[in-house]
Image (cartoon, rainbow, N blue to C red):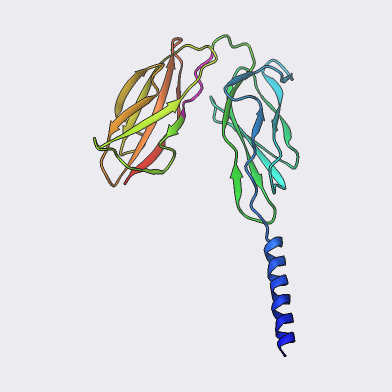
């Protein structure tokens, strides 16, 4: 009798172990390769005076069946998408325009997806000057919960770049309403951190406008955080 019980336990253990091993796993995040982040893409194949075909490339992801490439024109907001099982894809995009792109990883056996980082670039064209790339928000991140310091302040930080290397200043907007309308600071090009006064149990919205010496300006987009 004991022998049968032991056999049953061993069999149950084997079945359980197999189920665990066969459980589908969510896809992994991919690393982008090309076009390079905050660069000018000069290797596209010219299709006509206004458009060139650019090959987007990324590293292979773990547990990934298909990838969704999403490319957004920063001036028009037009989004192009393509699904592929490969680690590269070609899209026709406008010359002389700013773009952002990322890759979403998918696994056919699970509903979860994961997105790569978002990279910005300019597609080469006749443009001789460039607007700054939108500022990358570093801290606080989107929807992050934060604590204020002993002075009832929170530190905002970001990074920015410009192909012309002529960033002039940053305008930082913060308020409890969206879009944020209160200008809380104007900083020089080498200042990318600003401390702001906040209250507990409050959600704040903020954005950074990057301006260059040519009069161009870009918006980081609206981010939010909650002070605990």
Q: Which residue lies furthest to the bottom in this view?
A: 1
Say which residue appears at 73% left-offset and 34% top-offset: 88
Q: Quadrant of the N terminus?
A: bottom right
Q: Does the magenta stretch include residue 46?
A: no
Q: Does the magenta stretch include residue 132?
A: yes
Say which residue appears at 60% left-offset and 38% top-offset: 116
Query: What is the quadrant of residue 30 in the picture?
Result: top right
Residues in magenta, as a range: 130-136
Q: Position of residue 46 (x, y in %)?
A: 73, 18
Tell me, yes or no, if residue 109 can be seen here: yes
223 or 18: nearer the viewer: 18
Question: Left or right: 55 with respect to 29?
Answer: right
Instruction: Decide: is 6 above or below 147.
Output: below
Instruction: Decide: is 226 above or below 44.
Output: below
45 or 107: nearer the viewer: 107
Q: Where is residue 14 in the image (x, y as percent from the top left)?
A: 72, 71
């Amino acid at each position: 009798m004991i022998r049968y019980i032991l056999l049953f336990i061993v069999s149950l253990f084997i079945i359980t172990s197999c189920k665990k091993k066969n459980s589908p796993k969510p896809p992994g995040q991919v690393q982008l390769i090309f076009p390079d982040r905050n660069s000018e893409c000069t290797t596209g194949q010219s299709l006509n005076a206004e458009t060139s075909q650019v090959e987007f490339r990324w590293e292979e992801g773990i547990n990934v069946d298909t990838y969704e490439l999403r490319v957004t024109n920063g001036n028009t907001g037009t989004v192009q998408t393509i699904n592929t099982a490969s680690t590269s894809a070609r899209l026709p995009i406008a010359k002389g325009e700013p773009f952002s792109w990322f890759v979403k990883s998918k696994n056919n056996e699970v509903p979860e997806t994961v997105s790569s980082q978002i990279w910005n670039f300019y597609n080469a064209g006749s443009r001789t000057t460039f607007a700054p790339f939108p500022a990358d928000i570093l801290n606080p991140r989107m929807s992050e919960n934060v604590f204020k310091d002993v002075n009832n302040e929170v530190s905002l930080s970001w990074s920015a770049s410009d192909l012309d290397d002529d960033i002039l200043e940053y305008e930082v907007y913060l308020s409890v309403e969206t879009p944020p309308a209160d200008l809380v600071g104007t900083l020089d090009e080498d200042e990318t951190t600003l401390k702001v006064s906040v209250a507990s149990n409050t959600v704040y919205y903020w954005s950074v406008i990057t301006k260059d010496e040519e009069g161009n300006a870009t918006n980081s987009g609206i981010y939010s955080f909650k002070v605990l």
